[in-house]
Image: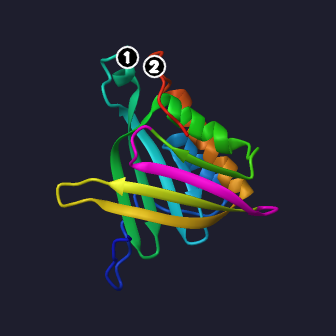
Amino acid sequence: MTLPVQRGQRPSLFLEVIVFTTESIRTVQKTRGAALLGTKCVLRVEVLGYEFPHVTTGLDADWLIVRADWLAQTGRLRCEGAHLLADELAAWGASIATLDLDEIALAFTEPNLRFAYSKRGPDLHVARIEMLCESSQGDIQLETSLEVSSIMLTSFGRGLQALARRFPARSRSRGRVS
């Protein structure tokens, strides 16, 4: 589901200006998060911090507050919450930073976020994103696919890895990545 934008109104993008170049993606990833750019849309993932910053042991120490934004010409959807464990973020980044596999599907402990990709050609992949945004007004589910180049997909993976280095696992407990 995408949220409508009224005619003549531009969606309010918190990314400011998106220029579809590799250099601008690197800049976004260094300063704020990881961005995956398709031909007509953007998936942006940002870690806001640990859910329980003062807890340093046990599984609760590793929950991350993640903000995922889906931006398209037709609208924008933002999900924010404790959707990933720190080691799941690291595994997600590592699994796509090198594109060693032609196809991958990831599900995490918290089922609000899923990610998959499959190779479609020598330099073309199809990424599939599922996000469930829970709110007091009801849940919104987004299921979408976008075509991305190998460069964009590996850049996204490296951006996730950079986020994982900033927010490492603080306990020995490990989540589930399948």
Question: What amino acid type is highlighted by mark number 1?
Answer: Gly
Q: Compute the Cα span from label 2 to label 1.
A: 6 Å
Q: Dominant secondary structure of the magenta stretch?
A: strand
Is 142 placed above or below 35 here?
below
> What span is in magenta?
109-123
Question: In the drawing, does residue 5 fall left or right of residue 72?
Answer: left
Quadrant in which the C terminus appears: top right
Can the viewer see residue 23 in this picture? yes
Q: Which residue is mark 1?
A: 58
Q: Which residue is mark 2?
A: 173
Residue 118 forms part of the magenta stretch: yes
In primary-sequence order, the first of circles 2 and 1 is 1
Q: Secondary structure at mark 2?
A: loop
Is 81 placed above or below 142 here?
above
Q: Secondary structure at mark 1?
A: loop
Quadrant in which the N terminus appears: bottom left
